[in-house]
């Protein structure tokens, strides 16, 4: 692409591998980085390094955190009898913005997708089952409202129901095909308030 700047071409190639970033957007980002003062570009590089060094997955809920267990798992003000199951850490962050919804989370690390080769063993499902004890009264399944999310919810409900807790699914306040991370707080609260047993 850029004959005289192999490093810029490599940067564009790398940035275009990010989700939602096409070749044109990657080129715009690369040229923006080039225009930054050196200290700002190096600050970005340092932040990426810091995130990779410090951020890990909580060994309890598999959310991202700089501590283990994470702040959500150790918060005594959260309902310990309710676990909200989400696909990704971004989904937990979106739901956690709803102030009235102070529960614990469990991040699956994806969703069932046989076409992509993602089965139950590729997700944190076994770890979720191990978290369900006598104190857990409800499991809220908050996977995304798309085909894979619905399949994951159905699979989890069949697996969890015999263990005793009530299994609910967030209501259809979210449009089908959307992602939790892009929903506003009002929509999320309606979806949570209208959850139903499955």
Image: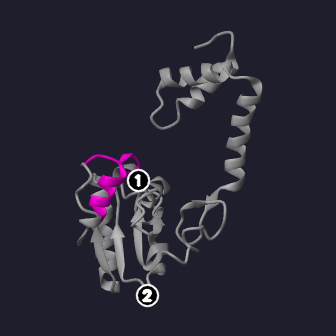
* Residue in the image at 48% along x and 80% along y: 130
Q: Report whether residue 151 is seen.
A: no
Q: Residue at x 65, y 20 (%)?
A: 8
Farthest front residue? 99
| Range of magenta residues | 176-192
The answer to whether marks 1 and 2 mark residues whose Cβ atoms lie closer than 8 Å is no
Horizontal arrangement in the rendering, residue 21 relative to residue 188 (left or right): right
| Residue nearest the viewer, comparing 112 with 193 | 193
User: Within 10 Å of the Cα at label 2, are there few (<14), some (14-19), or many (20+) other Cα atoms?
Assistant: few
Mark 1, mark 2: which one is toward the viewer?
Answer: 2
Quadrant that contains the C terminus: bottom left
Question: Residue at the location (60% across, 67% down)?
Answer: 70
Q: Does 61 sit above or below residue 147?
A: below
First in sequence: mark 1 vs mark 2: 1
Q: Position of residue 16 (x, y in %)?
A: 52, 29
Where residue 160 sits, quadrant-wise, is bottom left
Q: Secondary structure at mark 2?
A: loop
Q: Quadrant of residue 166?
A: bottom left
**104 within the magenta span:** no
Cα distance between the residues tagged 1 and 2: 34 Å
The residue carrying pointer 1 sits among few (fewer than 14), some (14 to 19) or many (20 or more) residues within 10 Å by Cα, namely few
State the image quarter where residue 188 is shown: bottom left
Which SS does the magenta portion mostly show? helix
Residue labelled with disc 1: 117
In this view, 18 is above or below 104: above
Query: Residue 187 placed where, x, y %?
Result: 29, 53
Q: Is residue 61 left or right of residue 184?
A: right
Nearer to us in this view, 174 or 88: 174
In the foreground, 50 or 157: 50
The label on residue 135 is 2
């Amino acid at each position: 692409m850029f004959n005289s700047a192999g490093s810029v071409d490599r940067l564009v190639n790398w940035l275009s591998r990010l989700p939602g970033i096409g070749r044109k957007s990657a080129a715009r980002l690369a040229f923006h980085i080039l225009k930054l003062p050196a200290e700002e570009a190096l600050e970005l590089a340092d932040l990426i390094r810091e995130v990779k060094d410090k951020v890990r997955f909580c060994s309890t809920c598999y959310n991202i955190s700089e501590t283990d267990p994470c702040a959500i798992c150790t918060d005594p003000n959260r309902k310990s009898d309710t676990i909200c199951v989400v696909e990704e850490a971004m989904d937990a962050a979106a739901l956690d913005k709803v102030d009235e919804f102070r529960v614990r989370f469990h991040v699956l690390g994806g969703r069932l997708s046989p076409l992509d080769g993602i089965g139950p063993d590729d997700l944190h499902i076994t770890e979720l089952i191990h978290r369900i004890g006598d104190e857990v009264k409800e499991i809220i399944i908050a996977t995304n409202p798309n085909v894979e999310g619905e399949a994951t919810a159905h699979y989890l409900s069949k697996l969890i129901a015999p263990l005793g807790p009530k299994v609910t699914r967030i209501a259809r306040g979210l449009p089908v095909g959307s992602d939790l991370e892009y929903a506003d707080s009002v929509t999320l609260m309606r979806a949570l308030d209208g959850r139903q047993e499955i």
